[in-house]
């Protein structure tokens, strides 16, 4: 009896050639485009070609695990791998020959075909390879039971298409236990607030504001961003009543843009920048640590934290930050409810959003703990009602 028709998309990369390398692969149902399995792994120091061939091998293994009798079309943007595995070019490199031979034993040669595709059509496999390199870890995800109608990364759909309607029979008047007591069935806007990952100033406790572009993420900060991206991707498994994100908006600072890029790769969504989401401007305190600020401006840092209205020299108060950030959030709310937006920002900036949503005075906002790459979730309604679903949810450190 003939097996399933599957598509394997595979890729690999090396940051330096050779250099830190990783591979990515996914298996789709050929008829629906639905992702059935994802694989990625960090290879240590390796060449780009070794990474590409390893992605092919692991993609075929994942397809074999789904159906040993499957007929597989392999799609890759590596002309070298496609031509060599199709038998039109010789494989001269010993390491590549060994991986190719192992790949050839996974499924009968008559069951596998190879197609070259442009890089843009192999973005999901590339995203997985980058995830492996960012985290220096492995990815094994299987999705055999997800609804066939659900949009997945790279599946055939229009980039601007509306979100799928609720499943038949869904009762929007039923609220999860512990959720805001809202019985009219009105849809909310879900805002997933993600703080950026670690930077050099995070390590030393320096005040890093919105008045300068930098600093960039540390190596550990990039790992944190990749982990946060994975948690955002799985968010509906934690809160099944929340919609899947359909938009990513980020502060213009380098650290938030880098964090948002990791989330973008994971969700397959573009990043939009909004300058109103930048961190508090600290003026003359920029890059200084708390002891340094206290030495030069005795008692003033405490006033900034505890009053909500104190303006540091050349900077902003908590309330001033809250007002400009709220303008951005109100714009998101006017753009439509019943959807989820990922907002990548900063510690003080996120505190203002949550503090205002809870109706807390600005003098209390600094009491909210927002660690690097933590998630905070807010649900907001057009009439001003709001629910703080989570504050500072850790994504791993």
Image (spheres, helix red, strand yellow):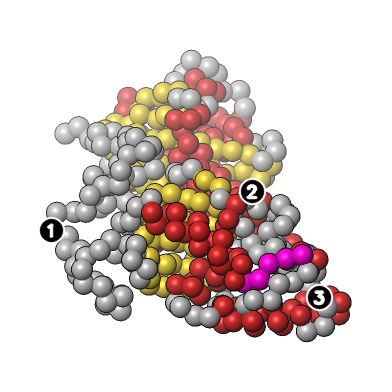
| Residue sitting nearer the eye, 23 or 33 | 33
Q: Please give the name of the residue rendered at 53% of the width and 17% of the height, measured from the top-left corner.
A: 89
Disc 3 versus disc 2: nearer the observer: 3
Instruction: Give the alpha-carbon distance from disc 3 to disc 2, as whole Å.
Output: 42 Å
In this rendering, is residue 149 above or below 313?
above
What SS does tag 3 mark?
helix
Q: Main secondary structure of the magenta part?
A: loop
The stretch of residues the image draws in magenta is: 314-318
- Residue 313 appears at what percent x and percent y? 78, 69
- Residue 304 appears at what percent x and percent y? 69, 77
| Circle number at residue 44 | 2
Q: Earlier in the sequence, mark 2 or mark 1?
A: 2
| Circle number at residue 293 | 3
Q: Please give the name of the residue rendered at 51% of the width and 29% of the height, measured from the top-left corner.
A: 119
| Circle number at residue 169 | 1
Whether residue 177 appears in magenta in the rendering, the answer is no
| Circle number at residue 71 | none
| Residue sitting nearer the eye, 143 or 395 | 395
């Amino acid at each position: 009896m003939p097996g399933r028709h599957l598509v394997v998309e595979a890729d690999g990369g090396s940051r330096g050639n050779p250099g830190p390398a990783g591979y990515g692969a996914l298996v789709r149902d050929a008829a629906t485009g639905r992702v059935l399995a994802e694989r990625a792994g960090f290879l240590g120091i390796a060449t780009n070609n070794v990474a590409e061939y390893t992605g092919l091998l692991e993609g075929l293994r994942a397809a074999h695990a789904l159906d040993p009798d499957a007929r597989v079309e392999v799609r890759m943007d590596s002309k070298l791998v496609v031509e060599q595995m199709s038998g039109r070019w010789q494989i001269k490199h010993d390491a590549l020959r060994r991986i190719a031979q192992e790949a050839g034993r996974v499924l009968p040669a008559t069951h596998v075909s190879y197609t070259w595709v442009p890089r843009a059509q192999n973005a999901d496999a590339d995203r997985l390879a980058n995830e492996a390199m960012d985290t220096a870890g492995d990815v094994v995800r299987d999705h055999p039971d997800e609804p066939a109608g659900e949009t997945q990364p790279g599946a055939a759909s229009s980039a601007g298409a509306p979100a799928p309607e609720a499943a038949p029979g869904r009762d929007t008047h039923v609220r999860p236990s512990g959720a805001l007591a809202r019985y009219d069935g009105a849809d909310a806007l879900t805002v997933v607030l993600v703080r950026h990952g670690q930077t050099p100033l995070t390590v030393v406790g320096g005040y890093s504001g919105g008045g300068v572009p930098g600093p960039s993420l540390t190596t550990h900060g990039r790992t944190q961003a990749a982990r946060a991206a994975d948690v955002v991707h799985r968010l509906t498994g934690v809160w099944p009543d929340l919609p899947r994100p359909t938009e990513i908006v980020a502060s213009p600072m380098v650290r938030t843009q880098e964090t948002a890029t990791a989330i973008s790769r994971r969700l397959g969504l573009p990043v939009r920048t909004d300058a109103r989401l930048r961190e508090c401007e600290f003026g003359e305190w920029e890059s200084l640590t708390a002891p340094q600020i206290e030495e030069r401006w005795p008692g003033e840092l405490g006033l900034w934290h505890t009053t909500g209205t104190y303006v540091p020299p050349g900077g902003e108060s908590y309330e001033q930050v809250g007002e400009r950030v709220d303008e951005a959030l109100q714009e998101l709310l006017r753009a439509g409810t019943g959807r989820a937006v990922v907002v990548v920002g900063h510690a003080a900036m996120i505190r203002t959003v949550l503090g205002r949503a809870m109706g807390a005075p600005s003098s209390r906002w600094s009491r909210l703990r927002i660690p690097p790459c933590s998630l905070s979730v807010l649900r907001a309604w057009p009439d001003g009602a709001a629910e703080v679903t989570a504050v500072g949810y850790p994504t791993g450190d």
